[in-house]
Image (cartoon, rainbow, N blue to C red):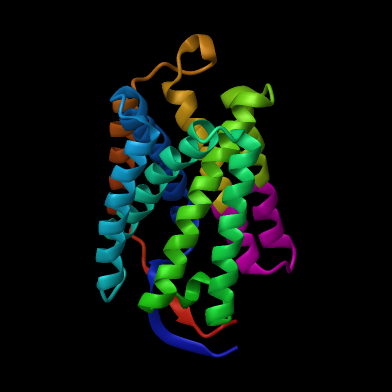
Amino acid sequence: MNQDIESSKVPEVTLVFWIIKILATTLGETGGDAVSMSMNLGYAVSSAIFIGIFAAAVAAQIATRKFHPFLYWLVVVATTTAGTTMADFADRSLGIGYPGGSSLLLALLMISLALWYWSEGSISVNTVATPRIETFYWVAILFSQTLGTALGDWMADTNGLGYEGGALVFGAGLVLIAAAYFFTSLPRTALFWSAFILTRPLGATLGDLFDKPLKDGGFAFSRYSASAILAALIIACIVLLPQRAAMRSGET
């Protein structure tokens, strides 16, 4: 395995990374619902808005030469908000339901990862340093965030678990992945993408738990208040818990 001493343009995957990721995915749920539902813009219009924000943010991220924490996490939040409204559009507006929406999004994610691997020989985040690889990376993230939203809604709405139960299921899944990371030799890249996908439905169920009415099992926070609190927590984490760029590697 050849190692390159240069830095990647994505953060080192540490506990801080996962904390901010969960906060960002939860913000994506409350923020996406605030625009599509509270503002009554609908899923299609909201998706168009958030995809536009994502496109602008990811263009700035790809154009920069090194890792910038605020810019990186802005793009992640953009993928989570876009993922929320896109998943709702697929599940509800297209009329294919949660199974159909989740299956479609899983297929798109697998295709994006397969194309990335076919082109570059690796889907490791430690190789993200060139514009082409970074494009593959952000497309995969956008699809993974959208898939995660659909899975979270499917689990909470149709399996009788509610938002608390859904959060516990996905949280348990992440614990199992963490155990596999520390106690097995399973491929680290596969474990990363599995955890990355599962943090999104965890955030989706937590976001719904915050802003749904008490009668529906939520805490009845307004979507605007919940989004503001989550945004403040993300900013505080970035400022108080500094991150460094992952080191580039030539692994395949």
Residue found at x 29% / y 27%: 224
The spot of residue 196 in percent (x, y) is 54, 54
Chief secondary structure of the magenta span?
helix
Identify the image quadrant of residue 154.
top right
Q: Residue at x 65, y 25 (%)?
A: 158
Observer-nearest of 13 and 182: 13
Task: Find out whether residue 178 is within the magenta segment.
Answer: yes
Residue 226 horizontal/vertical position (percent)? 34, 28
Which one is in front, 117 or 41? 41
Quarter containing the N terminus: bottom right
184 in relation to 79, above or below = below
* Left or right: 54 in relation to 217: left
Q: In this rendering, would 204 be left or right of 69?
A: right
Give the farthest residue toward the front. Answer: 94
- Observer able to see residue 86: yes
Q: Is residue 167 visible?
A: no
- The number of callouts visible is 0
Find the residue positioned furthest to the right.
184
In this view, the residue farthest toward the top is 215
Q: State the residue in front, 170 or 54.
A: 54
**Residue 205 left/right relative to 47:** right
Q: Residue at x 37, y 19 (%)?
A: 221
In the picture, which quadrant includes the C terminus?
bottom right
Instruction: Please say whether residue 48 is one of the residues in the magenta stretch.
Output: no
Q: Which residues are magenta?
A: 174-196
Q: Residue at x 48, y 32 (%)?
A: 93
> 197 or 21, which is in the foreground?
197
